[in-house]
Amino acid sequence: MASPAFEDIAETFDFLDDWEDRYRHVIELGKAMPPLDDSFKVPALKVNGCASQVWLRPLLNGGRFDFQGDSDAMIVRGLIAVLHALYSGLTLAEVLQVDASAELGRLGLNDHLSSQRSNGVRAMVERIRSIASAG
């Protein structure tokens, strides 16, 4: 159950043979993402469990989930962009149905991220699921 935006990323990853090219693509996705205004880089929006600083600002619009995010690390900004593609526009119930581990596994991220980065992605997914649960 992935969004069309996430499917586009998955198709691009299928096309890119080399992990270095995939890594660069993730960074490019992060660069293309609008920055989070500094006024939202506050402790309440900070994601604990990430080696880098990460902020996720939830936006609920008409029962649809969206968020803005940012990080001080370019690869993490890219991972935020991937998660945005995975979750943005879903209903809160759909957000809770997403198997993020399986979807991200399709990209091979689990095999190529450091354990700290993997823990950070898990922390971001947990925050997203928590927001959707509280909805």
Image (tube, rainbow, N blue to C red):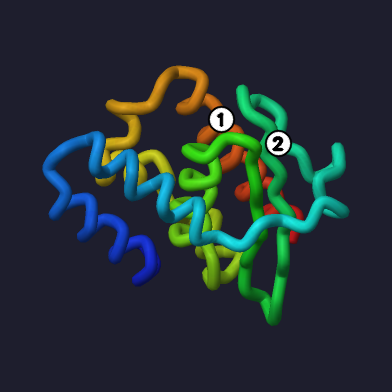
Amino acid type at image mark 1: Gly
Q: Are marks 2 and 1 in contact (CB under 8 Å)?
A: yes
Q: Quadrant of the N terminus?
A: bottom left
Q: Is residue 88 above or below residue 40?
A: below
Spot occupied by residue 5 in the image (x, y as percentages of width and height): 38, 68
Q: Is residue 12 above or below residue 122?
A: below
- According to the picture, the residue beneath numbered tag 1 turns out to be 120
Left/right of residue 19 with respect to residue 4 in the rendered view: left
Left/right of residue 28 with respect to residue 126 in the rendered view: left
Left/right of residue 105 with respect to residue 81 in the rendered view: left
Give the residue displayed 60% in from the left and 33% down from the top. Answer: 123
- Spatial separation of the CA atoms under disc 2 and disc 1: 8 Å
- According to the picture, the residue beneath numbered tag 2 turns out to be 47
Give the residue displayed 52% in from the left and 40% down from the top. Answer: 74
Give the residue displayed 78% in from the left and 57% down from the top. Answer: 37
Q: Secondary structure at mark 2?
A: loop
Which of 4 and 97 lies nearest the eye of the viewer? 4
The residue most toward the bottom is: 62
Q: Quadrant of the C terminus?
A: bottom right
Q: Secondary structure at mark 1?
A: helix
